[in-house]
Image (cartoon, rainbow, N blue to C red):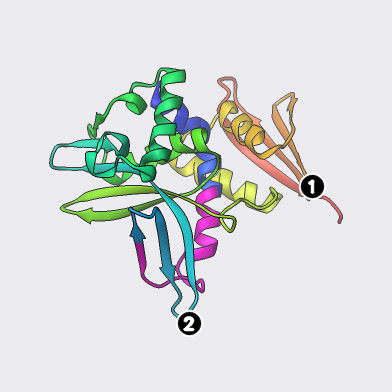
Amino acid sequence: MQLDALVHDAAILQAEAQAHLHDLIGSGTRFDGSWSVDLGLGRFSQSSTTSDETFTARAGLLGSAAPGPGSWLWAWANPQHDGPVAEAARLVRDLGERLQVAELTSAEVPLGERAPRDVAWRMGAAAILALGPWPTYTFDAGGGTVGALVLTSEALRLPAPSTPRLLRCIGEAAQSHGLGRSSVLTWASQRGVTATPTPDGLLLRLADGDVAVRLDERDRVVGMTGSSRPA
């Protein structure tokens, strides 16, 4: 299996996890202050600009993408970070071994023509399939290097699926990835939603409504509609 296929499959889940993170600590939220990470403790913190409150989450280091060597280095291959903080990266490696994805099992992965942050996001997508739908936090590590953390906490656990959020996430994911049947089925499987085949695609039945996804003859997502269900 290729990394591209994993990124494709995880696209909607990644959009949903990132949207939930932004709802909690994005610009304009109560936790939109300065951030810090203690890799020794595996703890991420972001302050509030309106109170003394601090948002905290467990932080696992996935790795870093550096323009100098032109490669992504997994945390499990970095002797500076071979402790508990690299456990998330090791679990992603285990997934790569099961699925035979070279980019997840090789200590260093060439960036190719991709920007460091783009590569970091792609590894974050793979992490979702290994760890569950937790968000990726990318950061500048100096010299053009981009690090990637996976954040976990009860606050970051996704709420029950909703029709408006799903429509938004499919739309956002479609702008950066080509979505297909497997993208929708992967989302549905991880989120406990039934995906029923229809003559022109898939029907997702949620607690608050339905989302109909249209697929073309090559199983690519080409449209979607949503309908609400009376409370």
Q: Residue at x 48, y 31 (%)?
A: 8
* Residue 68: in magenta span: no
Residue pointed to by mark 2: 50
> Which mark is drawn over residue 55?
none
Residue pointed to by mark 1: 207
Residue 29 seen anywhere in this rendered image of the structure: yes
- Residue 142 image offset from top left, x and y in percent: 19, 55
Q: Disc 1 vs disc 2: which is toward the camera? A: 2
* Residue 28: in magenta span: yes
The kind of residue on which mark 2 rests is: Thr
Q: In the picture, which quadrant includes the N terminus?
A: top left
Q: In this image, 190 relative to 61: left or right?
A: right
Looking at the picture, tell me which residue is in the foreground, 209 or 156.
156
Dividing the picture into quadrants, the one containing residue 35 is bottom left
Q: In the picture, which quadrant includes the C terminus?
A: bottom right
Secondary structure found at label 1? loop
Packing grade of label 2 (10 A; few <14, some 14-19, many >=20) is few
Q: CA distance from mark 1 to mark 2?
A: 35 Å
- Residue 9 image offset from top left, x and y in percent: 52, 31
Q: Which residues are magenta?
A: 17-36
The kind of residue on which mark 1 rests is: Ala
Rendered position, 32 above or below 151: below
Looking at the picture, tell me which residue is in the foreground, 169 or 73.
73
